[in-house]
DNA sequence: GTGCTATACTTACACGTGTAAGTAATTTGT
DNA sequence: ACAAATTACTTACACGTGTAAGTATAGCAC
């Protein structure tokens, strides 16, 4: 009933256990050689017993786990899932498995999760931190240990970073909205933690400030669920004068905003324009299709894996900072500002 | 630069390595006792060195990995994420980490992933299989070993199963659509593999057959992406006569269908009714909000974990088959059949 | 003082693997 | 013909941990 080990295989094949190990790991360097005949016999025994190597023993011996850990803020936002997909794809292509943890927007849990991932002595870690600031000490430890840790957005000195180009994306978006004649542009900043999505808000403020059109009443902070987006938009729609456009920090919340507009009997984009960030997959299929800023999230995931693996292979290589570019995607949810 | 081990802690505390181990695992049974003073000294040394147990070594010794593996068909469908959320929540609450793999709708990859999960000698496995039939031998091996494996939908003799109650849900849905006067009801069966979502299709066929209204031309098989849903619906809308209602195998594809209807300038539900399954989170926020069948996916995940853990604790307990009930959720995407 | 028990440890083994170093038989070089 | 090299293995150790079994000291009863 117990799983067979190399020893069992060796016994059945009539060779020593080492031979089995050599056969399995097919020594390419010529230091050890094995007859084709015994090789076949060993392979036959493996097949016969259904032997599979014990991963924990391999890890203990080799120091590698063949696991990449990924921490994401929450599992509700499709944007994060697309990142997960990129990571899983790239990881599996290189023979790594994926250990996934989510913060669930709880700082305690984020800390707990990071620790759990560390204890596993996972080969590489990709962190998309929500409350990074509270983990300063832990993160610094990581940096000092020079373990392969990649940050996905955010900055910690001493760690590789993959940064989504939201800043340029936000700038493109603002330029576009202004070109449509919008002046009363609101911003829904619905995130788990104020620092998240901060660049988008900053660009928004700067651009409007330059023109003297910034009105802090139109910046709404809220949570990160669909319902939060709905509520925030509802609040904005009740303002007078109403904003002519609402820029939402991510597409998920923008969906909530679209619903709020529809529930008030207003039309998008004739009465009000709505735009988001991320270009999650449903964005193109909404009614109306959502104008947004695409940051290829799968690429974000892929690049993170690439950096982690590269760091594993050469711990001394210079720090990398990769920026994944953003692109404005214009769809039907935005249009010219209505005449007052 | 290397991580400290128990041996380092022992040296620093001036005790034997075994003592350190006993302190850490705080022997509750009185077989071994340790002075409070040395206990403190050991704890101090642990703190001092920042010692953390080596998970692989613990696994090797104890035979437990403290990891639960989860295999899902693909990462595009929010429904599966909700299951993942339930699993991750429940697992973490019990001190388990989550190893996630996705099939990506590729049978080869499903097989590969299942093997990878097995090799890790993971404590428990939760499988949501797509191409289960091709894995018959592997699965049977699982069953024979009586490892803690839970199937999420599907049936393999000898394994615990958590089954979503789509069957009763589909029946409710059909009754509801018929009560609205619909006779020309189409079905979009967009899944990676014909067996997936089979119960829903079966119920659909049976109900219509009973009334002699079944028309196989209105059963469309397609892939599992939003675009597939869009295309399938487009095709149906070009039929003449047009169906008055489209039942879609899941909400994700239903979103594509909604878009297709809107693109043709038709109205939902005045011209055509659309309904889905799963009640993914966005369903309530779509335009119009989507009528669907809710199967609490987080509960699916949670229950799976519960079964896995129970099976771990008692491998001999009788097989469990849990059915998570489904519930019709009526929203605005369905209405009375238009008069011809 | 002797025998017995309780306390507070330590010694020693096992988990399953990868690989360096050793060995015996065969082949090659001159 | 004999040293040297190559082939085809095997023996032996290390990875870090959990725990059973052993040991040494002290306390106590008689």
Image (cartoon, coloured by chain):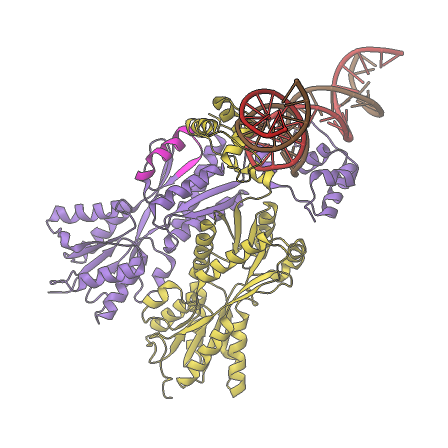
Chain colours: A purple, B yellow, C brown, D red
Front residue (pair B167, A265): B167
Dominant secondary structure, magenta: helix
- The front one of A50 and B232 is A50
Judge from the rendering whether residue A308 lies leftward or rightward of residue A252; answer left or right.
Answer: right
Magenta run includes residue A140: yes
The foreground one among A231 and A213 is: A231
Q: Nearer the viewer, residue B233 or B2?
A: B2
Quadrant for residue A31, please give it: top right
- Examine the rendering and report whether any part of residue A331 can be seen: no
| Image location of residue A23, percent across then percent down | 70, 36
User: Total number of numbered labels?
Assistant: 0
Query: Residue B102: x and y, percent?
Result: 51, 54
Is residue B256 part of the magenta span, yes or no? no
Q: Quadrant of residue B333?
A: bottom left
> Can you say whether A189 is above or below B2 in the image?
below
Rendered position, A270 above or below D9 = below
| Residue A135, picture quadrant | top left
Task: Give the left or right position of residue B335, taking residue A195 as reference.
Answer: right
Q: Assign the C terminus of chain A to one quadrant of the image.
A: bottom left
Give the residue displayed 50% in from the left and 34% down from the top.
B24
Range of magenta residues:
A133-150
- Residue A166 visible in image: yes
Q: Is residue B16 above or below residue B204?
A: above
Q: Position of residue A225 (x, y in %)?
A: 31, 57
């Amino acid at each position: 009933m117990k799983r067979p080990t190399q020893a069992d295989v060796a016994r059945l094949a009539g060779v020593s256990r080492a031979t089995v190990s050599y056969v399995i790991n097919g020594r390419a360097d010529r230091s050890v050689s094995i007859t084709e005949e015994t090789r076949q016999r060993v392979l036959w025994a493996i097949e016969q017993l259904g032997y599979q190597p014990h991963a924990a023993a391999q890890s203990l011996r080799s120091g590698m786990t063949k696991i990449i850990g990924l921490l994401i803020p929450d599992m509700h936002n499709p944007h994060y899932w697309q990142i997960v997909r990129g990571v899983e794809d790239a990881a599996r292509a290189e023979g790594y498995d994926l250990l996934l943890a989510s913060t669930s927007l709880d700082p305690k849990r984020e800390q707990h999760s990071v620790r759990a991932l560390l204890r596993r002595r996972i080969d590489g870690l990709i962190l998309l931190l929500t409350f990074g600031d509270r983990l300063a000490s832990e993160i610094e430890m990581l940096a000092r240990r020079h373990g392969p840790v990649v940050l996905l957005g955010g900055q910690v000195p001493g760690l590789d970073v993959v940064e989504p180009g939201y800043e340029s994306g936000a700038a493109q978006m603002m330029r576009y909205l202004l070109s449509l004649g919008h002046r009363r542009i609101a911003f829904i900043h619905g995130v788990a933690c104020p620092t998240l999505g901060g660049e988008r808000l900053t660009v928004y403020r700067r651009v409007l400030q330059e023109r003297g059109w910034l009105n802090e009443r139109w910046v709404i902070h809220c949570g990160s669920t669909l319902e939060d987006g709905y509520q925030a938009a509802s609040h904005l729609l009740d303002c007078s004068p109403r904003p002519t456009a609402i820029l939402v920090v991510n597409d998920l919340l923008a969906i909530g905003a679209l619903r709020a507009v529809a529930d008030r009997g207003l039309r998008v984009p004739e009465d009000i324009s709505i735009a988001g960030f991320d270009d999650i997959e449903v964005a193109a299929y909404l009614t109306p299709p959502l104008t947004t800023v695409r940051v290829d999230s799968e690429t974000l995931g892929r690049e993170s894996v690439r950096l982690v693996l590269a760091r594993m292979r050469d711990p001394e290589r210079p720090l990398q900072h990769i920026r994944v570019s953003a692109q404005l995607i214009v769809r039907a949810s935005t249009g010219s500002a209505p005449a007052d």
